[in-house]
């Protein structure tokens, strides 16, 4: 739940039956030092070229699970912006499926200036951490890793994947590791 800029996580009966997990860094924070983005000036996501909060909400509510059309998505984190390299701005927002009891079922949605341009990775992932600018037209996205035997409560680590604009959509600049739980839930636009 989000209230007045405070993230409150409610966990019901969370028992980690898997092996002890490495400490999770899936809270908004600076990117891992080995994956630091190049030094660039980021554009405020609430610049006049960025989508409004209402436009973000409308775009996210138009996304649904293919098999469960009553689901929709809501913002889970504040928008993040990066220049497009041509005077505009790209905006990224981490969104979570509604309704969800455990906070899983997340995507990252993107806008170019005020235009919604899509989401990644195409299927819901269990957990998305920090999203940070990674140079013009690119974002570094932290995703939870679940090794063999890891319970959903206890990711075994995280990985950073850079998604860049290819002129038509955002795409991973490298293959998403198999330990990222991509699940089988396909997201589409109503």
Image (spheres, grey):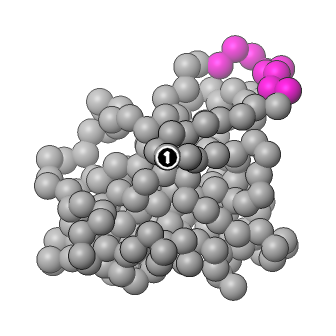
The C terminus, quarter of image: bottom right
Residue visible at 64% across and 46% down in the picture? 1
Which quarter of the picture shows residue 17?
top right
Residue visible at 50% across and 66% down in the picture? 109
- Left/right of residue 114 with respect to residue 103 in the rendered view: left
Q: Is residue 134 magenta?
A: no
Residue visible at 73% across and 60% down in the picture? 98
Mark 1 Cα shell of 10 Å, populated few (<14), some (14-19), many (≥20)? few
Rendering coords of residue 62 (x, y %): 64, 79
Q: Which residues are magenta?
A: 13-21
**On screen, 183 above or below 85?**
above
Residue visible at 54% across and 64% down in the picture? 120
**On screen, 23 above or below 176?**
above
Magenta stretch mostly in which secondary structure? Answer: loop
Q: Nearer the viewer, residue 11 or 137?
A: 11
Rendering coords of residue 23 (x, y %): 55, 19
């Amino acid at each position: 739940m989000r209230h007045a800029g405070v993230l409150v996580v409610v966990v019901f009966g969370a028992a980690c039956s898997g092996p002890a997990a490495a400490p999770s860094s899936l809270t908004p924070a600076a990117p891992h030092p080995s994956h630091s983005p190049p030094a660039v000036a980021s554009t405020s996501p609430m610049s006049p070229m960025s989508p409004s909060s209402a436009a973000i909400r409308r775009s996210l509510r138009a996304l649904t699970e293919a098999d469960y059309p009553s689901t929709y998505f809501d913002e889970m984190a504040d928008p993040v912006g990066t220049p497009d390299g041509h005077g505009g701005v790209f905006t990224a927002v981490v969104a979570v499926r509604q309704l969800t009891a455990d906070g899983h079922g997340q995507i990252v949605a993107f806008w170019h200036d005020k235009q919604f341009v899509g989401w990644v990775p195409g299927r819901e992932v269990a957990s998305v951490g920090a999203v940070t600018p990674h140079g013009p037209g690119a974002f570094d996205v932290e995703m939870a890793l679940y090794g063999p035997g890891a319970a959903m409560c206890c990711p075994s680590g995280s990985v950073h994947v850079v998604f860049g604009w290819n002129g038509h959509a955002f795409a991973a600049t490298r293959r998403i590791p198999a330990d990222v739980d991509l699940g089988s839930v396909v997201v589409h636009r109503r």
